[in-house]
Amino acid sequence: MKNHRADLKTIARRVMIERGFLPDFSSEAMAELAGIETAATEWDSNIRDLTGLLWASIDNDDSRDLDQLSAAEPHPDRSVTILVAIADVDALVMKESALDTHAKHNTTSVYTAGDMFPMLPEKLSTDLTSLGEGQDRLAVVVEMVIAEDGAILSSTHFRALVRNHAKLAYNNIAAWLAGEAPAPEGVKAVSGLDAQLRLQDQVAQRLKARRHEQGALSLETIEPRAVFEGEVLTNLRVEQKNRAKELIEDFMIAANQATASYLNGKGMPSFRRILRSPERWQRIVEVAARWGDHLPPEPDARALEVFLIARQKADPLRFPDLSLAIVKLIGRGEYVLDQKDGSPEHFGLAVKGYTHSTAPNRRYPDLITQRLIKAALAGESTPYQPEELKYLADHCTERESDAEKVERQLRKSAAALLLQSRIGQRFDSIVTGASDRGTWVRLLEPPVEGRLVTGERGLDVGDKVWVELVSTDVERGFIDFARA
């Protein structure tokens, strides 16, 4: 009997090790874990009891490592206080502990079609340090007052005890917010939660509109997720953007900005998450020129956003491939040490003073930032010296790149596995890459990319082409097509 999940898990473990990750926890870390039996229960006068607020989580259907909750309070002047509660992972994962050492080595949870390799053991990340439904948990809260035009008027941080009143899923909430489906049971079960979520959605849309006016980029790339029936891979499904995902994304961006500002105001050294102004801007100008659009000679996020919106409306089918090309030309985000508010802004988000703080169960930079916040709140000195943070910034940037390569490899292997029984079949496709190194095509259905090994002459990016599948290599994630 086929067990595609097991096959992909074996490949995932191999690729993890090849990239220098530790797929398993050490005996020391497991011994430390065995000594943690309950969630943190420390309590003092500096920790507020906010369990009565209508906190809720919105995440993927199958997510159990819940890092954040949100709540909102309206004001007569039409401003709204948004509160984002972030799981207090540091309460159980102490700096320099065996668990922390593992997390510092990998720096991130790695999500693949074969398996999920958590940064922290699941007893913690999906239970004792997760903001699970119906559980009282310690959190670091970011409180922001948002004006009617989406400007952040003020922000502050504090520690609190919170309770998740509803574990909600992106797709159900998005369909409800769009008027395409009734309210999910989790919303109907909590009195007042429907109005609370609609208010949050309104504020998120204000935040989004303001960022895009300032040059945040509208990009849409395709990253298919494996769909299994039992242990058999049956399809690849593209996860679409929706209102619920945007709600969480916009709140997290605002919370990360507020956190960078808070640490700067306290004189704390901190990580900044940046995306430098594109060095390959001239190539982006050339790409825009193919469609008759003119971009200025120097990097200009607002001008690029106008071009992207126009292309998305004109050709939604090819827009994900254009987005991917722009993403590659802009370059990668990175972590840098910044001891004062002078780091470059994030080109893709059009924000200054930005960090990562909202996912400490899944990302090590966020756990570092949480320790810095808690030290600042307590009036203590920094738990990290600048030299240590400089090393960790470079290390986390490198590991993030490695994790993306593992995840990309497994997407390719899953695609090859899905198609291996369909050799000789023909498909509609779009050319996604054409250079001296080869020509690449993406099938319209299933959403799989592979190399065109014959018949590539005369083709360019964006061309539609009829192709025939000639070979697959599941171990290496290779898929080869011929022009039909």
Image: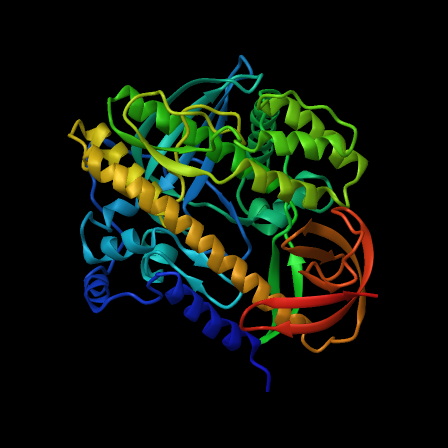
Depth check, front residue: 449 or 385: 449
**In this rendering, does residue 63 appear at all?**
yes
Q: Which residue is painted at 40% across and 55% down in the image?
A: 109
Query: Image height check: is 274 above or below 411?
Result: above
Q: Which residue is painted at 23% across and 61% down in the image?
A: 37
**In this rendering, does residue 71 appear at all?**
no
- Most extreme residue toward the bottom is 1
Quarter of the image with the C terminus is bottom right
Residue 479 location, quadrant: bottom right
- Most extreme residue toward the top is 77
Q: Which residue is painted at 15% across and 30% down in the image?
A: 381
134 relative position to 231: left or right? left
81 relative position to 341: left or right? right
Q: Position of residue 35 (x, y in %)?
A: 19, 62
Q: Which residue is painted at 43% across and 31% down in the image?
A: 255
Residue 230 location, quadrant: bottom right
Query: Image height check: is 228 above or below 129?
Result: below
Depth check, front residue: 323 or 121: 323
56 relative position to 285: left or right? left
Q: Position of residue 45 (x, y in %)?
A: 20, 31
Q: Position of residue 225 (x, y in %)?
A: 60, 59
Q: Tell me how many marks there are.
A: 0
